[in-house]
Each structure stands twice: as structure tokens, then as C-alpha cells.
């Protein structure tokens, strides 16, 4: 059995930065994304820096349950022990609910929630069997509040947050740890894909590298929840003092110019 770190959404942004960190610590990589050209570029870049590790790539559409199963089967056939798992794939969409493309929203739930749930569950068995493993699930500060005009995205990240904290509790007493990482806005292709440039003009984003470095350190320490940045921690804490209706109003003003 060969130890591998599986990272989804690895063709760029946060996934790429996590791949570099894990490679630096001598972890073999299995990188997954629907962008094959991006995967090859990341593989080539990391191979130049750390040529002593093995790097495998898989192009996959994580909104397809069949492709999720193929990835798991591939790992079994190759005898890969996924001892580190980073569920980094995800996307958003900033649109009024009445105007949303329903197929895009369903695909978002599949990628942001179902793929993450699937990989967390199927790779957990070997982790528990070997009493070794780290899972990092990427949520967001969006998961703490309702999000008018980005409602599906906020709801999906709330799912990731609640799921992760629950699993982490169940894993207490084992050497398998699950971290739910909650960044605020960070520099990536997310903003252009989600048409969410208004939020990024109001809130200064940090780099994907900074988010990955913080998440990586927290994972190694065995933490179950990590909110990136002091201001973001305040943002997540403050809503408990206000009504849900008021919180939704403030959230909406940060997402769309009204």
C-alpha cells in the first residue's frame, strides 16, 4: 500500500497551494480537477521543485457520482492509501435566486457538498484501519450566515461546516483528524466564475497561499475548525448577538449593491 495525499480542485488556487505544501513535506500526490491542462501545469511545477515524490493526476467532473466512484476505484486498484485528503473543489454563483440556472445550482451542491461527503466517507475506512489520517474540508465564513444573492453557495458551505464539525467529534480518540477550514475572500478564479467582484471590492482578499499555509498548520495540530483571519473570526462570532433577519440584511449588502 502506497501513501498518497488526494487533493481536489488542484489545478490552481487553493488546491495548488495545498499540493505544494504537502509535496514539500515529502507526500506523494494524487491531484484531481476537471481542468487537465491546469493539472499538468501544476504537476510540472511541483515536479521541478520536489522531484523525489510521485505525482499522479486525474481529470474528473466531481458533479458526477459515477466519476466519484471511479476515483475511489482507481485508488483501490493502485493500492493507494489516502492518508491525507483535501476537499478543495468548489464554486459559487452570485445571482438572484429567481434568475439562477437550476442545473448550475444542482451541480454546485454536487461538487461543494456531495463530492466532499463521498470522499470523506470512503477514504475514512483505511484511515481508521491504520489509525492515521488528516482530512481538510474547505468551507467558508459564508457558511456561518445566510447569503441572499448567493444562497446556494452559502447553504452549501453551511453543510460543509456542520458536517465537518460533527465528523470531527465522532473521530475523537483516534489519530484521524478532520479540519473544517473557513476562509474569507482570497485571490483565486472563484470571483470571476461566481461573478462576485462586488464583495471583493468591499473586503480585501488575502492570497490563496496564506489560506493554505494556515489550514495546513491547523490540520497538523489536529484542530477541527479554523477561521482564517482575526476580522473573519469576529465576523463569524458577531451574528449570534443579532436577529437572523438583520444578519441576512447585512450579508446581502456585502454581496450585491442594493
Image: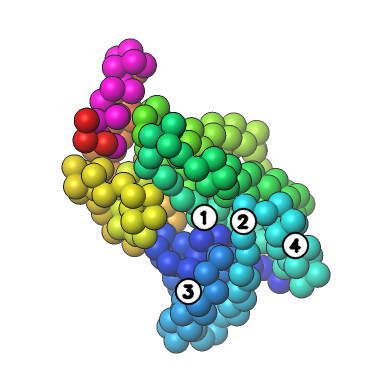
As drawn, the label of residue 38 is 3
Q: Mark 3 falls on what kind of element?
A: helix
Callout 1 environment at 10 Å: few (<14), some (14 to 19), or many (20+)?
many
The answer to whether marks 2 and 3 mark residues whose Cβ atoms lie closer than 8 Å is: no
Q: Earlier in the sequence, mark 1 or mark 3?
A: 3
Q: Residues within 10 Å of mark 3 (few under 14, many from 20)?
A: some
Say which label, 1 or 2, has the lower sequence index.
Answer: 2
Residue ID for mark 4: 70
The residue depicted at 29 percent of the width and 37 percent of the height is 255
Q: Which mark is residue 89?
A: 1
80 and 169: which is toward the camera: 80
Q: Residue at the spot x=22%, y=30% of the render?
A: 258
Span of residues in magenta: 241-255
Q: CA distance from mark 2 to mark 3?
A: 16 Å
Task: Assess whether mark 3 and mark 1 are in contact (beta carbons under 8 angstroms).
Answer: no
Residue identified by numbered label 2 = 62
Answer with mark 4 or mark 1, whichever residue precedes in sequence: 4
Distance between the alpha carbons at the discs numbered 1 and 3: 14 Å
Amino acid at each position: 500500500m502506497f501513501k498518497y495525499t488526494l487533493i481536489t480542485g488542484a489545478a490552481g488556487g487553493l488546491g495548488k497551494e495545498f499540493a505544494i505544501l504537502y509535496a514539500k513535506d515529502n507526500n506523494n500526490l494524487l491531484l484531481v480537477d476537471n481542468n487537465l491542462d491546469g493539472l499538468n501545469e501544476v504537476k510540472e511545477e511541483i515536479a521541478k521543485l520536489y522531484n523525489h515524490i510521485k505525482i499522479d493526476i486525474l481529470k474528473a467532473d466531481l458533479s458526477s457520482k459515477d466519476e466519484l466512484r471511479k476515483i475511489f476505484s482507481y485508488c483501490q486498484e493502485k493500492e493507494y492509501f489516502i492518508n491525507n485528503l483535501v476537499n478543495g473543489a468548489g464554486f459559487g454563483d452570485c445571482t438572484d435566486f429567481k434568475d439562477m440556472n437550476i442545473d448550475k445550482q444542482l451541480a454546485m451542491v454536487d461538487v461543494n457538498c456531495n463530492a466532499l461527503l463521498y470522499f470523506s466517507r470512503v477514504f475514512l475506512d483505511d484511515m481508521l484501519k491504520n489509525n492515521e489520517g488528516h482530512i481538510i474540508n474547505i468551507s467558508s465564513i459564508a457558511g456561518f450566515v445566510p447569503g441572499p444573492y448567493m444562497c446556494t453557495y452559502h447553504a452549501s458551505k453551511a453543510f460543509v461546516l456542520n458536517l465537518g464539525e460533527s465528523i470531527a467529534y465522532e473521530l475523537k480518540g483516534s489519530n484521524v483528524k478532520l479540519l473544517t477550514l473557513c476562509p474569507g475572500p482570497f485571490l483565486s478564479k472563484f470571483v470571476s466564475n461566481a461573478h462576485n467582484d462586488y464583495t471583493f471590492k468591499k473586503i480585501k482578499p488575502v492570497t490563496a497561499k496564506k489560506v493554505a499555509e494556515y489550514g495546513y498548520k491547523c490540520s497538523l495540530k489536529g484542530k477541527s475548525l479554523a477561521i482564517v483571519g482575526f476580522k473573519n473570526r469576529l465576523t463569524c462570532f458577531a451574528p449570534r448577538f443579532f436577529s437572523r433577519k438583520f444578519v441576512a440584511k447585512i450579508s446581502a449588502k456585502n454581496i450585491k449593491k442594493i
